[in-house]
Amino acid sequence: QVQLVESGGGLVQPGGSLRLSCAASGRIDRINFMGWYRQAPGKQRELVAAYIIGGSKNYADSVKDRFTISRDNAKNTVYLQMNSLLPEDTAVYYCNCQGRTTMWRDFGSWGQGTQVTVSS
């Protein structure tokens, strides 16, 4: 079983910055996808930024040039640096990780979610 622990959400004023982190633990052999989704009230969950297999990065158009995803492979951890935050970035941010365990089983795990609120 693979578990994800997120941290770093909070309340910030428009134009401010926050950094989220997500650490995966468990019997992980390989990670194919690791990144961040968000869900605002009344809206569907959407992909924000992620690493996909091969190391490429994907970003939602709405966050390009403002958000940066990075990772520490040794720690199975990804980070999301969010700059120039806007009120419309307000949402619960969820980490997602997919890959294969050391028991040769595919896994897909979600974090518990962390609230990001952008408001003056």
Image: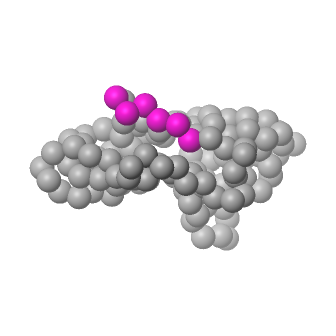
Estimate the x, y position of residue 26 in percent, counting from the top left. 25, 40
Residue 77, placed above or below residue 61: above
Q: Is residue 76 magenta?
A: no
Residue extent of the magenta highlight: 69-74
x 80%, y 52%: residue: 87
Q: Is residue 73 left or right of residue 18?
A: left
Quick one: 76 or 40, which is closer to the camera? Answer: 76
Residue 105, placed above or below residue 45: above
From this viewpoint, is residue 2 visible?
A: yes
x 43%, y 53%: residue: 52
Estimate the x, y position of residue 97 in percent, counting from the top left. 39, 51
Q: Is residue 69 left or right of residue 105?
A: right
Residue 81, placed above or below residue 52: above
From this viewpoint, is residue 34 visible?
A: no
x 48%, y 49%: residue: 56
Q: Magenta segment, principal secondary structure?
A: strand
Estimate the x, y position of residue 10 in percent, counting from the top left. 67, 38
Q: Number of callouts in the render?
A: 0
x 17%, y 56%: residue: 105
